[in-house]
């Protein structure tokens, strides 16, 4: 984990797309990014090349359009960011994090049921 390079915010946006799609070309990633932000194609291309160099994505160069896949898992990345957030912002208290998260917006009954189910499992 020590040599694990943490993705930047822009790299995380690209990883979200790749985690959802499983694999994509630069053009496909760029088109999806363009729906929510103003990013040039060459910027997306450069970012994905850097991500490949950092080991965040893999690249299949066997076809004309290179196919990129995530090299790190969503779960591992979420855990790393969450651990850092709990230590840095919530004085190491996961309780404070949960209370803050639940207090920020209205949770649906389905979400509350899932949280309760998870809490019940933890108590066992």
Image (cartoon, rainbow, N blue to C red):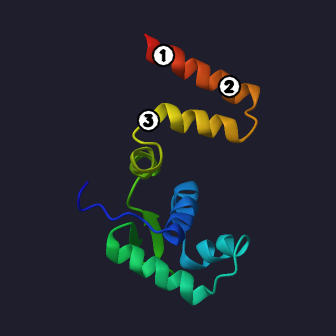
Q: Residue at x 48, y 72 (%)?
A: 67
Q: Residue 9's spot in the image, x, y percent?
A: 52, 67
Categorize mark 1 by other alpha carbons within 10 Å: few (<14), some (14-19), many (20+): few
Q: Nearer the viewer, residue 108 or 46?
A: 108
Q: Quick check: marks 2 and 1 in contact, CB under 8 Å? A: no
Label 2 and label 1: CA atoms lie apart by 14 Å
Query: From the viewer's perspective, is 14 left or right of 5?
Result: right
SS type, badge 2: helix
Which residue position is annotated with label 1? 121
Q: Residue at x 62, y 73 (%)?
A: 28
Q: Which mark is residue 93?
A: 3
Query: From the viewer's perspective, is 81 left or right of 106?
Result: left
Q: Quadrant of residue 117?
A: top right
Which residue position is annotated with label 2? 112
Q: Does label 2 or label 3 sit earlier along the sequence?
A: 3
Q: Examine the rendered structure and indicate whether residue 120 appears above or below residue 103.
A: above
Q: Which mark is residue 74?
A: none
Q: Nearer the viewer, mark 2 or mark 3?
A: 3
Categorize mark 2 by other alpha carbons within 10 Å: few (<14), some (14-19), many (20+): few
Q: Residue 84's spot in the image, x, y percent?
A: 40, 50
Q: Nearer the viewer, residue 52 or 116?
A: 116
Q: Residue 99's spot in the image, x, y percent?
A: 59, 33
């Amino acid at each position: 984990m020590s040599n694990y390079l943490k993705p930047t915010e822009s790299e995380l946006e690209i990883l979200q797309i790749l985690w959802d799609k499983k694999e994509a070309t630069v053009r496909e990633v760029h088109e999806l990014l363009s729906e929510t932000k103003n990013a040039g194609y060459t910027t997306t291309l450069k970012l994905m090349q850097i991500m490949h160099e950092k080991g965040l994505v893999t690249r299949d160069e066997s076809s004309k359009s290179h196919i990129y896949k995530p090299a790190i898992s969503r779960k591992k990345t979420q855990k790393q960011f969450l651990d850092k957030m709990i230590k840095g912002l919530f004085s190491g208290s996961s309780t404070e994090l949960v209370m803050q998260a639940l207090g920020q917006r209205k949770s649906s009954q389905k979400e509350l049921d899932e949280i309760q189910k998870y809490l019940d499992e933890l108590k066992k």
